[in-house]
Amino acid sequence: MFDSEAHSVREETASAAASLHCMPWRTLETDVPAWDRLALDASEPNPFFESWYLLPSLRRLPHSETVMVLRFEMDGRLAGLMPVLRSPRYYRWPVPNLASWLHDNCFCGAPLVRRGAEDLFWRAVLDWADRAAQRALFLHLRAIPLEGPLHAALSRILAEQQRQCEVVLREDRALLSSDLTPDAYLEASLSGKKRKELRRQASRLAEAGTLAVERREDGEDLAAWCDAFLALEASGWKGKAGSALANHAATDSLFRDSLQGAAARGRLERLSLTLDGRPIAMLASFLTPPGAYSFKTAFDERYSRFSPGVLLQRENLQILERADIAWTDSCAAADHPMIDHIWRERRAMARLSIAIGGPIRRHLFRHFVRAETARSPAGGSL
């Protein structure tokens, strides 16, 4: 048998054993063990779509009742998962679309897909979008990493199907990924003058009391740690602006629930810089080997002249010494004034709009997305 024919037979066999269903998100509440296994075997880690983060998000946040979940199975086993919704609006425009579901505290939209099943997953998703389009003009995916097996597989399927896809927004955010030691990385990132200033600030801060660093991966005293973090964040500009997690009961609960769930699965690292036992800078990171995500950080603005947030990030460079973590996503906005000066690598994240349905719908999409990308030079063809 020729290689192409053998490949075709394997594809047909695999497709016959694969299926995708769109269902209410609450159906996953009874399948958490399978969900957790999928997360551990995912081709790309995404803590924000793991059970311990996505379920609290859906339970706690408003307007989540219309969210559905695309559940992809192979041989009866959960092999892919992505939350979606049918939206009547595309940002400020009244243009119906199918979209992956994210919220303000969800920093990655990569679906959880079993390693090796990426092509089959995207074929199934695009086939579903074609069949389920109804009034939707296109499929919109948010916060998709542009490097890695998921995007590579999506690009292959799009090319194979000659299906139009546009990058309507791209952001490059700070990433930590290096073989250097923490000290060598800091030396390469910051000038000698800046490193000297950091040492001076740490010394001056230590003169005010006992300065210590605490790093934990367990769940002990987690409730008290969350209390301290939420109070610290709310005491600064975010609290005054109404954007601190503690300003809203839903995000307060989401923070507590997700950290508890992450700790129970060994997915949480807590880092604190304390002065006389009181935290003045704190960081919660999700550990998702081979990557990690710096989820939330806060610092006491009364000590701003000592740069406690930067001093904490200096300690956070110790993650470079972990054999199981090859990279850490900052989860920060592009051009962040602090982390961009310390972390030198970048991770490209994009919003993708993909053509679905028949010829007329795709023709309309082509004109719509052409007008959108003309206004947005950060976008571009995929």
Image (cartoon, rainbow, N blue to C red):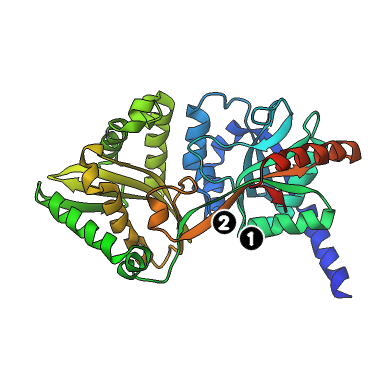
Instruction: State the residue position of label 1.
Output: 149
Closest to the observer, 370 or 322: 370
Residue 205: which disc? none
Compared to residue 53, the image places residue 271 above or below, namely below
Closest to the observer, 281 or 40: 281
Instruction: State the residue position of label 2.
Output: 44
Q: How far apart are the alpha carbons under marks 1 and 2?
A: 7 Å
Residue at position x 73%, y 40% in the image: 139
Compared to residue 87, the image places residue 35 above or below, namely below
Measured as percent of width and height from the top left, residue 39 is found at 54, 51
How many other residues sit within 10 Å of disc 2, few (<14), some (14-19) or many (≥20)? many
Measured as percent of width and height from the top left, residue 152 is found at 68, 60
Which element type, helix, strand or loop, lies under badge 1? helix
| Amino acid carrying mark 1 in the image | Pro
Measured as percent of width and height from the top left, residue 340 is found at 42, 54
Residue 126 in view in this figure:
yes
Left or right? Give the position of 60 relative to 25.
left
Measured as percent of width and height from the top left, residue 170 is found at 61, 48
| Label 1 or label 2, whichever comes before in sequence order | 2
Residue at position x 75%, y 59% in the image: 156
Kindly indicate whether the residue at mark 2 contacts the one at mark 1 (C-beta within 8 angstroms).
yes
Closest to the observer, 145 or 363: 363
